[in-house]
Amino acid sequence: MSHPASSVSIFIGIIRRDLQLALRRKSDSFSALIFFAVVASLFPLGIGPETKLLMQIAPGMLWIAALLAAMLSLHKLFTEDFIDGSLDQILLSILPLPLVVLAKTIAHWLSSGLLLALVSPILALQFNLPFDCIGVLFLSLLLGTPLLSLIGSIGAGLTLASRGGGTLLSLIILPLVAPVLIFGAGAVESYQAGLGLTAHFSLLGAMLAIALFLAPIATAASLRIALE
Amino acid sequence: MRISGDNGSGKSSLLRILCGLLAPQSGEVIWGDQAIYKDRDQFHSELIYLGHIPALKADFTALENLISLALLGGQVTTAKEALQALSAAGLADQAHRVVRTLSQGQKQRIALARLRLPQPKSLWILDEPFNALDQKSNQLLQSLLVGHVKHGGIVALSSHQTLSMDDDPQVVRLEL
C-alpha cells in the first residue's frame, strides 16, 4: 500500500535514484576514471624514468590528477536535472533542500570520488611507492574526495544557469579546494618523511565535518538563486 | 482556477510563484494561514506541481520515473499502484519502456499519471497540462481534474485551449 515516506527513506531514495542513473550511464564515471589514469601515466612520460624523483612527486601528482578528474563530472550534478525539469520537483520535495542536496552529493561522491580513491593504489604502483605510503594515499583520498564533491556542489549550484558552466565551475572551485590538496598530498609526504599523520588527517577530517554541515546549506541557497 | 493568456504573458511565472519556485517581486503567497516560504515542507506535502516539461529521467522506465517522483513528493508507492496509475492513463504497455524511446505526448501522460497515484495532495498546480495530449487523453484529464475539485481539491492550471470544463461555474478564470 502507498504510505507517507519518512525523511530517511526519501534521503536514501534520492541516493539510490542518482546511483541508478549513474549505472545506466556508465560512460560518465568511466571517463573520469580513465582521465585519472591517463593523467597519472603522462607524468612519468613527461618527467622521465627517474625513480627517486617520481617517488617524491607521486603523492602530489596523483592528488592533482584525482582532483581534476573529480572536476570533470561535477557540472553534471545538477545540469541534467535542470534541463529535464526534475530540479523543480527536487526543490518541491518535502525533504528540506539542504538534505536533498546532501543526498545528491553523496551519490555523486559514490559514483566518482570513491571510484577514484579505489583505483589510486593501482596507479600509485607505477611510481614505485612503498605499500604503506600507498595505504596512506588511499586513506587521504578517501577523506579528501568527499570534500571535493561537497565544495564542488556549491559551484555546481552557482554556475547552473550560466552558459559555459563547466569552465566557470572549475575556475570557482579549484582555488577553494587548494587546502584539501595541500593537506591530502601533505599527509603522504609527511608520512614519507616520518612525521606522522595525525595533524593532516585531523585537519582533513575537520574540514570534512564542517563541509558536511555547511556546503549543502550553501548549495541549497545557490540553487534557489539559480532557478529564479 | 484556470489561467489563460498569450504566449509570454506570465502564465508559467505566475504558477511558479504560486508554488514557491519563484519569489514574487512584491506581496506573498499564503497557504492556510501563513506564507508558503515559512513552512515549505508542509506546503510541499500538499502540493503537486507539473511544469511545462515532463520532469522525467530519459534513462528510467515510465514506472521507475513515477515511483521516484512520488517518493520525492513524500509518498512511498508500490510498483502495483504505479502500474495502475499508468494503465488508467492508457500507458500499460509502455510502463517498462525507457522514457527516451517514448513520444512527447506519452511523456506528458506519464507526468500526468502522477495525479492518479493514491495520495493525499489537495493542491495541483499544472502548467499547460493539455499540451501534446490527444483528444482522448484530453477528455480523461478533464474528468480527472473535475473529479479532484468535486472531492474538495484545488487545481490551478494554465492552458490556451478551450476546454469543455470551462463552463463549470466552479471554475475561476484569470486572463493575463
Image: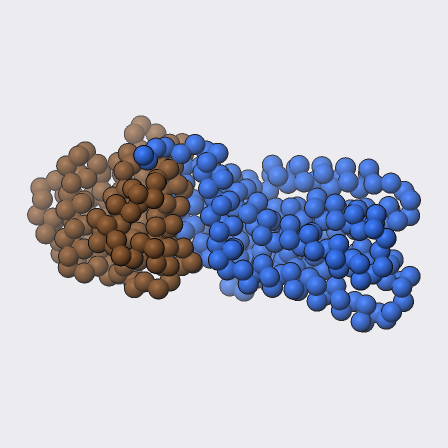
User: Residue at the spot x=79%, y=47% of the render?
Assistant: A135
**Residue A76 or B62: which is nearer the viewer?**
B62
User: Residue at the spot x=62%, y=39% of the render?
Assistant: A212
Give the position of the N terminus of chain B as an image quadrant. top left
Q: How many marks?
A: 0
User: Residue at the spot x=54%, y=42% of the render?
Assistant: A102
**Residue A29 or A70: which is nearer the viewer?**
A29
Say if residue A141 shows up in the picture. yes
Residue at the far top: name it.
B33
**Displayed quadrant of residue B99:** bottom left
User: Residue at the spot x=80%, y=55% of the render?
Assistant: A59
Q: Position of residue A182 (x, y in %)?
A: 78, 50
Say if residue A161 shows up in the picture. no
- Horizontally, residue A34 falls left or right of residue A136, namely left
**Displayed quadrant of residue B78:** top left
Q: Position of residue B87 (x, y in %)?
A: 23, 50
Colour brown, chain? B
Colour blue, chain? A
- Horizontally, residue B55 falls left or right of residue A116, namely left
Q: Position of residue B98 (x, y in %)?
A: 37, 59
- Horizontally, residue A136 falls left or right of residue A26, namely right
**Residue B27 or A201: which is nearer the viewer?**
A201
- The colour scheme is by chain
Q: Position of residue B35 (x, y in %)?
A: 36, 33
